[in-house]
Amino acid sequence: MFNTRLPIFAFLLLCSSSAPGQTPAKEPDTLQVLLTEVHRLRQDIEAITVASQRMQIALFSLQMQDAAVARATARLDAARNRCSSAQNNRDHLAADVQRTEAVLTNETASTAVPTDAADLRSHLSEMKNEADGAQAAVLACQSAESDASNELRNEQAKLSDLQDRIGNLDKALEKLGIAEK
């Protein structure tokens, strides 16, 4: 009886060892699938990290550019205010010159004292010099205003470009999110 059991026992041992042998054949396939999935997850995480960093850089750039636009706007407003003040000063001086010329014309037509007319002519000459200086100040101010206006347009264009870049990054991230699902 011992002899008949030995071949049966050996047969069962061989059958049981072939079954575990088949399971390890499936394990490398499962392991390979898991490794591939882990690799893809790592690539996705790296892509998301890079996109997040690019978005942070773009947002920081946007903040800096927004501040540059605000500074350029303030410079333009200041230039406009200086120009307005210079124009008002020029107009005031021009009106004074006209009034003084009218007074001088009326006085020379009448029997005025010649010394008063000489004083008025001297004063008129000084006023005309001031008016010329005021006109030069207005022209210089208008040039500065034009420069400030150009600078503001340039800064606004840069801001618009950054906003477009952020919009494109947002769309790319959205596409990544949709592709993941």
Image: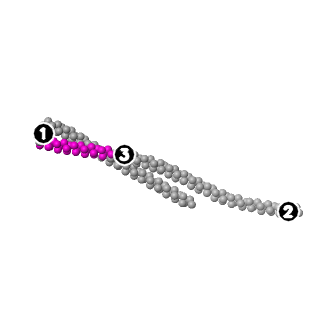
Q: In this view of the protein, can residue 180 be seen by the observer?
A: yes
Q: Dividing the image into 4 quarters, which one contains the C terminus?
A: bottom right
The amino acid marked with disc number 1 is: Ala
Estimate the spatial distance between the alpha carbons at disc 1 and disc 3, rounded to whole Å: 51 Å
> Is 128 placed left or right of 158 in the picture?
left
Q: Nearer the viewer, mark 1 or mark 2?
A: 1
User: For the stretch drawn in magenta, what is the main secondary structure?
Assistant: helix
- Decide which of 115, 40 is in the foreground and name it: 115
The amino acid marked with disc number 3 is: Arg
Q: Residue under label 3, please give it.
A: 75
Mark 3 residue element: helix
Mark 2 residue element: helix
Tell me the crowding category of disc 2: few under 14, some 14 to 19, or many 20 or more residues within 10 angstroms, Cα based.
Answer: few
> Is 111 placed left or right of 142 in the picture?
left
> Is 26 placed left or right of 16 in the picture?
left
Q: Nearer the viewer, mark 2 or mark 3?
A: 3
Mark 1 residue element: loop
Estimate the spatial distance between the alpha carbons at disc 2 and disc 3, rounded to whole Å: 104 Å
Q: Position of residue 86 (x, y in %)?
A: 29, 44
- Tell me the quarter of the picture where residue 116 sits: top left
- Decide which of 8, 63 is in the foreground and name it: 63
User: Residue shown at 40%/47% (left/top)?
Assistant: 70
User: What colour scheme governs how the chains and residues are painted in the rendered image of this protein?
Assistant: one colour
Residue 112: give its label: 1
What is the span of residues highlighted in magenta in the rendered image? 81-109
User: Residue shown at 63%/56% (left/top)?
Assistant: 35
- Of label 1 and label 3, which has the lower sequence position? 3
Estimate the spatial distance between the alpha carbons at disc 1 and disc 2, rounded to whole Å: 155 Å
- Decide which of 121, 76 is in the foreground and name it: 121
Q: Residue under label 2, please give it.
A: 5
- CB atoms at circles 1 and 2 under 8 Å apart? no
